[in-house]
């Protein structure tokens, strides 16, 4: 994940605040935001929409073998969270006791460091979720 | 559209080839296939090569030109195709289309990956490119983690157990014992899998296919000319392909792969068969849960019954349907770009009765199923003797 500065900077609204979008034609919410509504295509009309920050665990795993950049965090939880509006996103779960990490448990967004882009690179921040 | 048949196959041993580079591997597989097909080098009119991550793994792109040059085939047109772990499958499909259209009579289709030149972490990062880098891998997901998320939902919704998933690994290792090209020719037990340590729970080390080097080639010919070269050509009677969301989180379900179901629907329609007509299948078992889901999505078992079927031995060699007689990705090895072609090689060997101790008896109809990433690309082919 070297030289990721534009990638980290460009998506900061989404990564920091769950800014997504919404299709006014079909009513679906999208996170991350989509350029084209995959249901309506050119008949779709997309506008910015804030995602809810509460949701529940849809699926989860405890990761023991990490990719580069996450070695110091193992083992850590990765989950797919279903937000209150039905949108699913993939995230890390933090500050959550193991006995509460189950499908259906309520979680909420928190703001955390995601990884460091090498010793002299940017630090990527963004959303993680934790058990309520 | 013209009929298309396989008239020759070639495979390297799958493993850690520290003494062989990418060039040596593709040359070995292609040389074997050309010899097997009894074609002359000049007969091959085009080359299609599947390769996923040579840029990340070797710093080498422009693989199409490399292949033609290395094989002494210049100036024949040579093109690389990439669809993550389905690179081989889509290359095969491109070769089929090129012959079916009438553009060429004979083409070579290869797949290769040289994965052990870099550390496991670097290889994992390169493989991560098969997923949604910007929104899933960025947040710390790995490929085992993505499949683990599917496995957890499958366990929740259908009661699938870790032991049932382990049964797929045990069966595939047992089959690989009889495959001279396989990486792990060693039987394992359910207990071995269960104690092998979590990579991403509920998936353990022995639920995962290994990072491997290897190459595979098939020679395709129009069916009308196939018997000029080969006494026992194998016709590819269907080719289906479908796509789905790149990000796993955006799927409406985690317990099936819609792209597999759609590619299978296309293939069964073209071949005018049903799932029950398939005698053997090479399915994409990059993780054991992937085999469970594939056997359901391809229609061999009802949704949710893939785990119990594996545990009951219904997918063993010459059981209800022989799944991964070669040992599958799990035990044969998974050099990602080569996998889709290696599956076609196995289907051919089975239908030509050349599979030795792992021969499926009465093999009439075979199927191969090749998945890219966590299911964003799927390719299904069906084979029978010409």
Image (cartoon, helix red, strand yellow):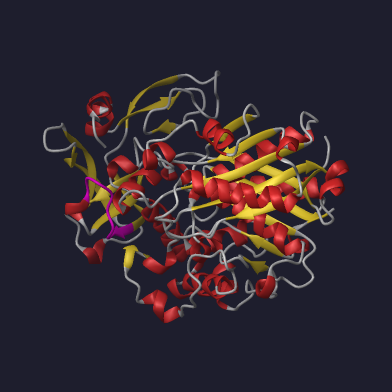
**Residue A123 relative to residue B218: left or right:** left
Q: Is residue B372 visible?
A: no
Q: Position of residue B327 (x, y in %)?
A: 56, 67
**Residue B95 relative to residue B126: left or right:** right
Q: Nearer the viewer, residue A67 or B10?
A: B10
- The answer to whether residue A59 is magenta is no
Q: Position of residue B285 (x, y in %)?
A: 53, 59
**Residue B200 relative to residue B233: left or right:** left
**Residue at 46% over, 78% down:** B188
Quarter-wise, where is residue B45 in the image? top right
Q: Nearer the viewer, residue B218 or A46?
A: B218
Q: Position of residue B262 (x, y in %)?
A: 65, 45
Q: Position of residue B227 (x, y in %)?
A: 86, 49
Principal SS element in the magenta part? loop
Q: Is residue B52 visible?
A: yes
Quarter-wise, where is residue A47 in the image? top left
Q: Quadrant of the N terminus of chain B?
A: top right
**Residue at 47% over, 29% down:** A27
- The answer to whether residue A68 is magenta is yes
Residue range in magenta is A61-70
């Amino acid at each position: 994940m070297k030289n990721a500065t534009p990638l980290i900077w460009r998506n900061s609204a989404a990564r920091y605040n769950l800014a997504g979008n919404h299709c006014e034609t079909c009513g679906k919410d999208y996170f991350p935001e989509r350029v084209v509504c995959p249901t309506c295509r050119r008949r779709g009309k997309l506008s910015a929409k804030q995602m809810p920050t509460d949701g529940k665990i849809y699926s989860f795993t405890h990761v023991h073998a990490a990719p580069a950049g996450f070695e110091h965090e193992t083992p850590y939880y990765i989950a797919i969270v279903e937000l209150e509006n039905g949108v699913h996103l993939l995230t890390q779960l933090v500050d959550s006791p193991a006995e509460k990490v189950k499908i259906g448990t309520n979680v909420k967004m928190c703001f955390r460091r995601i990884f460091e882009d090498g010793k002299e690179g940017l630090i990527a921040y963004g959303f993680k979720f934790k058990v309520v | 559209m013209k009929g298309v048949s396989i008239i020759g196959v070639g495979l390297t041993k799958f493993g850690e080839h520290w003494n062989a580079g990418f060039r040596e591997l593709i040359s070995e597989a292609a040389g074997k296939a050309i010899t097997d097909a009894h074609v002359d080098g000049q007969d091959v009119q085009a080359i299609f090569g599947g390769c996923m991550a040579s840029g990340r793994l070797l710093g080498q792109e422009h693989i199409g030109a490399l292949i033609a040059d290395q094989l002494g085939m210049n100036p024949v047109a040579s093109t690389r195709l990439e669809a993550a772990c389905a690179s081989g499958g889509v290359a095969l499909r491109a070769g089929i289309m090129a012959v079916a259209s009438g553009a060429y009579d004979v083409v070579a289709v290869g797949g290769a990956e040289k994965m052990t030149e870099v550390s496991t972490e670097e290889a994992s990062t390169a493989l991560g490119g098969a997923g949604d880098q910007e929104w899933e891998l960025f947040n710390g997901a790995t490929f085992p983690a993505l499949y683990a998320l599917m496995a957890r939902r499958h366990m929740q919704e259908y009661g699938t157990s870790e032991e049932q998933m382990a049964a797929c690994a045990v069966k595939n290792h047992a089959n690989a014992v009889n495959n001279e090209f396989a990486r792990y020719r060693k039987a394992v037990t359910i207990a071995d899998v269960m104690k092998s340590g979590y990579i991403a729970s509920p998936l353990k080390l022995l639920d995962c296919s290994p990072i491997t080097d290897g190459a595979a080639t098939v020679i395709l010919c129009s069916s009308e000319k196939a018997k000029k070269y080969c006494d026992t050509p194998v016709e590819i009677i269907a080719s289906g392909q479908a796509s789905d969301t790149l990000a796993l989180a955006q799927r409406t379900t985690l317990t099936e792969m819609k792209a597999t179901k759609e590619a299978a629907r296309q293939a069964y329609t073209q071949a005018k068969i049903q799932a029950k007509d398939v005698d053997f299948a090479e399915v994409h078992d990059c993780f054991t849960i992937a085999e469970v889901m594939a056997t359901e999505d391809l229609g061999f078992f009802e949704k949710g019954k893939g785990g119990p079927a594996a545990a009951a031995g219904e997918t063993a060699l010459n059981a209800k349907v022989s799944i991964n007689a070669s040992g599958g990705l799990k035990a044969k090895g998974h050099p990602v770009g080569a996998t889709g072609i290696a599956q076609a090689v196995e289907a051919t060997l089975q239908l030509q009765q050349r599979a030795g101790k792992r021969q499926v008896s009465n093999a009439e109809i075979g199927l191969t199923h090749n998945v890219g990433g966590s299911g964003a690309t799927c390719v299904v082919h069906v084979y029978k003797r010409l």
